[in-house]
Image (cartoon, grey):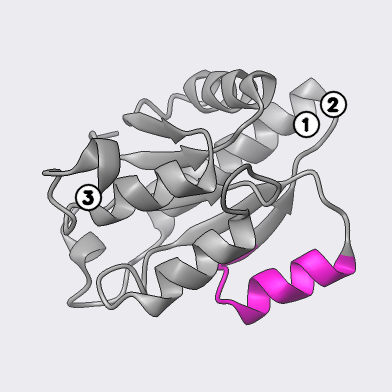
Amino acid sequence: MNNKIILLVEDNSDDELLTIHALEKNNINNTIVVARNGAEALDYLFGAGAYAGREAHDLPVVVLLDLKLPKIDGLEVLRRIRANEVTRLLPVVLLTSSNEEEDRLKGYMLGANSYVRKPVDFDEFVRAAGQLGLYWILLNEPPPHCPNSKKR
């Protein structure tokens, strides 16, 4: 696979390592940028803060977004992604341990492309992460005239 970026927004270091390991185990060798809170994720996406100067139009191919985050929660991050013209069509997968119906409903209402619960079992998680990566990186066709619509 080529070097399109995956943005992983995850505050739990164990879940971060597990997600990265699961993607690598499935031969998804894309660059993974990790944001450890919602504010850092937004800074990365919009080229602000520590990421000032980063080309804001060079977006990740997919955002794997946890819901329960410090500073700015995942639903607010999603709301801001959808409110911005540049990131409005960016694929966002809510990857969370939350099984709350309200979280799932709010996520979809705010424009999440998918809602995936993190499996507790390691092997299940590896399979789920591999399927996510393969789908969003190899199979998904982004909308035309979208910053992500360049050939992958």
Q: How many angstroms separate mark 1 from mark 3 (CA)?
A: 35 Å
Q: Position of residue 38 (x, y in %)?
A: 52, 48
- Which quarter of the picture shows residue 69? top right
Which residue corresponds to the image point at 51% horizontal and 60% vertical from the top-left?
77
Hey, what amino acid is under mark 2? Answer: Asp
Callout 1–callout 2 Cβ contact below 8 Å: yes
Q: How many angstroms separate mark 3 from mark 2 (CA)?
A: 36 Å
- Which quarter of the picture shows residue 121? top right
Which residue corresponds to the image point at 76% horizontal and 75% vertical from the top-left?
105
Q: Is residue 133 left or right of residue 6?
A: right
Q: In terms of sequence position, does the residue under pointer 1 or pointer 3 come before the other?
A: 3
Which one is nearer the viewer's eye here, 77 or 50?
Answer: 50
Badge nearest the viewer, 3 or 2: 3
Give the quarter of the figure containing the N terminus.
top left
Residue 124 is marked as: 1
The residue furthest right is 100
Magenta highlight: main SS:
helix
Magenta residue check for 108:
yes
Q: In terms of sequence position, does the residue under pointer 3 or pointer 2 come before the other?
A: 3
Q: Is residue 53 placed above or below 36 in the rendered structure?
A: below
Hey, what amino acid is under mark 1? Answer: Glu
Disc 2 target residue: 121
Q: Which residues are magenta?
A: 101-114
Crowding at label 3, few (<14), some or many (≥20) Cα neighbours within 10 Å?
some
Q: Is residue 152 left or right of residue 129?
A: left
Which one is nearer the viewer's eye here, 23 or 39?
Answer: 39
Disc 3 target residue: 47
Q: How many angstroms separate mark 1 from mark 2 (CA)?
A: 5 Å
